[in-house]
Amino acid sequence: MREIRRILLDADVNYKVAKDFIENIKVKALGKEVITSISPGQLITKIIYDELTELLGGGHKELQINPSGVTALMVVGLQGSGKTTFCGKLAKKLSEQKRKVLLVAADIYRPAAIEQLKFLGKQINVDVFSLEEKDARKVSSEALSYAKENNYNTVILDTAGRLHVDEQMMQEVSDIKNLVNPTETLFVVDSMTGQDAVNSAKAFNDTVNFDGIVLTKLDGDSRGGAALSIRSVVGKPIKFISNGEKLENLEIFYPDRLASRILGKGDVISLVEKAQASFDDLEAEQLEEKLRKNKFDFDDFLKQIKVIKKMGSLSSLIGMIPGIGSQIKNAQIDDRALVKVEAIINSMTREERTTPKVLNGNRRKRIARGSGTSIQDVNRLVKQFSEMQRMMSSFSKKGFPNSMRNFKFN
């Protein structure tokens, strides 16, 4: 229990939350009979997992959608927490669900926020409403009227943030909420700010009584600390988690999955969902056919690298694999390794990509110069690719080879 308390405090969990958590586990663990097929340690892990899941909210809470009329989603939080980027990510997700979305630039104090929202809207093909107006209340109410007149069924309001909680800011978000009467108010918080995240969450909840929490910049071992603390202190559900700058890096929050990650058990379900969202069914069938006929070449390999990059950073993907995340928590996983491989393949001719056997010494020197890499890098890639081709050939004839378990791609 001392070790668990230390881990929680290291992850920046509020000390009162950590204390109550330990006490609850003690109450549930003491006197519990251990089934002969499992060890006491395994049972403790199960109790901790169940308690973590319960503390994080128990079950997944859906985003509320207005069944008739406009769904207004008001986004609040401190400056620098990732509010504007989250608005773009949420707009993308809802657009993919066939919702007609209107982004509203209600942060009138920071011109860069308006420009950023317009840039994000252009990227995802979503309209942005803004006015040359110094009253955020007027911008918000007019945006809602505009949405109703132009058949938008979803409005996302990006409200102003400050470097710290102040009276003027709180009054403004309170007035906007009363004017707009949003379907949901979402509080965005930077999970790296530790205990400050808890304090700002409490202040916002006291003023606007928000409906859900969005955790941004979720990375490293602190990924559970802010989530545990805020959920426990404020008592509001976490709806989304964001762990990257790309517009695809937004996940629906599932308490059981985060509990599994905190305990180093990985998150296979989220990993599979990311893969399903990134892979094209037709391309997957074509790739399978090529593998069966042993015709997998550098062009196919390049396509798979691009798919992996769409899924997110390598460290976040590897962290979802059970048993791996805890082993590599201090390792530096460099996504630039994929960039180097891409550069080498892009420097090859069409013939060289489809028929790697023609890659003689002179060709490899030219590829190294063209890609800004060393000839050793090119040689390593070609060697490992030929090993992979041999294994795939073996797989297509006999099934999955044992040697694949020891294969590593650097």
Image: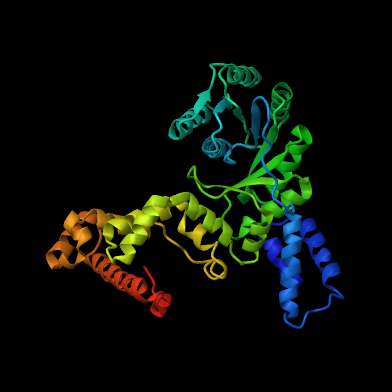
Residue 246 on image: x %, y %: 47, 45
The residue at the point 39 percent across, 55 percent down is 284
Q: Quadrant of residue 34?
A: bottom right
Judge from the rendering whether residue 125 lies leftward or rightward of residue 339; answer left or right: right
Q: Which is more toward the observer, 339 or 358?
A: 358
Task: Please report the residue visible at 35 percent of the width from the left and 58 percent of the height from the top.
Answer: 287
Position above or below: 262 against 63:
below
Q: Residue at x 41, y 77 (%)?
A: 406
Q: Is residue 217 left or right of residue 13?
A: left
Residue for point 68% across, 66% down: 7
Residue most toward the left?
362
Q: Quadrant of the C terminus?
A: bottom left
Residue 349 visible to the viewer: no
Q: Quadrant of the N terminus?
A: bottom right
Residue at the limit of the structure toward the bottom, as seen here: 36
Looking at the image, residue 315 lies above or below residue 74: below
Kindly tell me whether residue 16 is visible in this rendering.
Answer: yes
Residue 304's spot in the image, x, y percent? 37, 56
Which sits in the foreground, 399 or 304? 399
Residue 81: x and y in percent read 60, 41
Nearer to the camera, 349 or 365: 349
